[in-house]
Amino acid sequence: MSEAKAEAQAASVLVVDDTPENIEVLTGLLKDDYKVRAAIDGPTALKLVRRFPPDIVLLDIMMPGMNGYDVCRALKEDPLTQHIPVIFITAMSDVEDERRGFQTGAVDYIAKPFSPPIVQARVRAQLALQSRRQALEQEVQARTRELAQANAALSNEINMRRQAMERAEYLFNFDPLTGLPNRHQFMDRLGRLLARAHERGETLGVVIVTLDRLHLIKTTLDGGVSDQLLEQTCRRLQQNLHPDALLARIGGEEFATVLVAAPRADGPPPPAAGDLSMRLLAVLAAPFELSSGNAEVRASVAYALFPEDGGSALELMCHAEATLEHARLSGGNHVERFDREVESAAGAAFAMETRIRQALRERALVPYYQPKLESATGRVLGAEALIRWPLPSGGMLSPGKFIPVAERSGLIGAIDELMLEQTCRQIAQWRRRFRNFRIAVNLSATAFQNDALVSLVGAALRRSGASAEHLELEITEHALITDMNVAIHKLRTLRDMGVRIALDDFGTGYSSMGYLRRLPLDVLKVDQTFVRDIETDRHAAAIVKAIITMAQALELDVVAEGVESEAQLEFITAHGGNVAVQGWVYCPALPAERMEQVLAQGIVRPGSFPQAPEQDGESA
């Protein structure tokens, strides 16, 4: 293959000349390197160009009818053919003829008579130029596409960043679930309303509403249902406020509004915020229709007034929120107005939360162990681990003072984990000396509803080296408000590990024989509120007898807790046989080293330990 053919590959040439001899000569020169077609006049040439577009045209100028200029002009006026290079073939050598030819669109001239090297060189040169021109155009097109894509990507990124900024700005000011202003926006607008109220001599009330124990609803139901509850709460509040009233979602389950009242000539305005608070509490008392069924919730409402209860947005909100916390601590489901005593109580609760966090860091919370014994023989069966907080100054801080704060602040889960870990380590130490014993650990509702409960128990056993057969977990009826199937699965998994399960405080919740029959339990604990009154209340005595009989019929072990007198002990033994008991009649809760002595002793007689209660009002 010649050099030209290697370069041109399948390049095609159209030769147009009215003289057959010229066509024959040119075809002979080019046919070895190119695909050559020929036409003897202009109209035929145009038809061939449209049917078989050539890469180059060799065009005679002087032809009858339609001359070369006309053919070239027609080619250049057609967008489909205007890119095809045209070389004129002519015997004319006048400069004016050349100028006219170039103006028409020709790229070169080949003079007659033909010089073979010139014909071949000029065709090859024009084809090479055409090839480079096409490559350049393709590169330009590719670069243009790349630039367009880059511009589109840049435009898309700009739009995304703008949307992200708009979203961030929206989230900075509004709650995404309800569309209400959030705390930041509420505080800003409250500040402006306070400034206006100060100028006009108006009074102003800040009202805060919270759904009591929403965290239990979230752990019991899926997140979508709790979101439905919040959205419906928002709508109910909006329907009972003036259309122009400011309503905001300032926290997970907290909503806030502002009520402005004009001054009266005969004295301060009536506490309209109090009336509104009572109305909002009432509208939230009606059942909510959720996808999981109807649900009833309780709410707490608190309010503070300007200027009596605070002169700034921050002060007013702090006082209203302190009041709300006090309303929750008082059982919820009611309305409170701020007063200074509430502020002091909220400060004490915050201080206690801070102390609990420090105690967790320092591991100052420790288990004490109250022995469990056979009622008839006093034989030691094991113990229940009870949380204690020894104070550096001596004595104990009552669990009644810090457990409620831990539950409200979300710290109870960390306390449960600490107790489980410490108790398992103690079990691992005692199993080196003792064989037949079990130590029970209380699980809060929060711990039981934790999806990671099973893995937490397994990890505590592995890390400590304790055996599952020595561990018993006590759950309350309250912890079972979760999906019953989920609860049963957790309990079965724990039992499969070798851990025993006890139902604590039985009879104080929503006890049901139906779920009691389904639950994988080992132990039923009779609550101390019934045991305490069996000597004086025949109903309490009947309940205790019934629980013992029922548990034994279900082949469950029985533990009577809170047994404080020998008369109570005799009643339990008489009606339950040799069941397990725990309480002051035998022994209070003991530190680990003294509990070890009790395990070694093996038998405890009633009255062996002094009946003095622990300091700070603590009782086992």
Image (spheres, grey):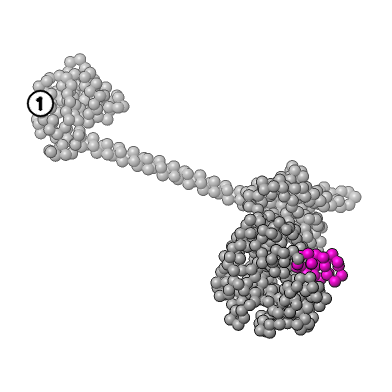
Q: Residue at x 76, y 71 (%)?
A: 576
- What kind of residue is marked 1? Val
SS category of the residue bearing label 1: helix
Please say whether residue 333 is visible from this viewpoint. Answer: yes
Q: Residue 51 lies in magenta, yes or no?
A: no
Q: Residue at x 19, y 36 (%)?
A: 9
Query: In the picture provided, is 396 more to the left or to the right than 171?
Result: right
Quadrant of the frame with the C terminus? bottom right
Q: Position of residue 398 (x, y in %)?
A: 75, 73
Residue to which mark 1 is pinned: 25
| Highlighted magenta segment, given as a residue range | 526-548
Which is nearer the eye, 240 or 587?
587
Residue 38 position (above or below residue 485): above
Which is nearer the eye, 296 or 605?
605
Q: Residue at x 66, y 60 (%)?
A: 519
Magenta: main secondary structure: helix
Q: In the rendered image, which quarter is residue 33 located in?
A: top left
Q: Residue 540 lies in magenta, yes or no?
A: yes
Please say whether residue 609 is visible from this viewpoint. Answer: no
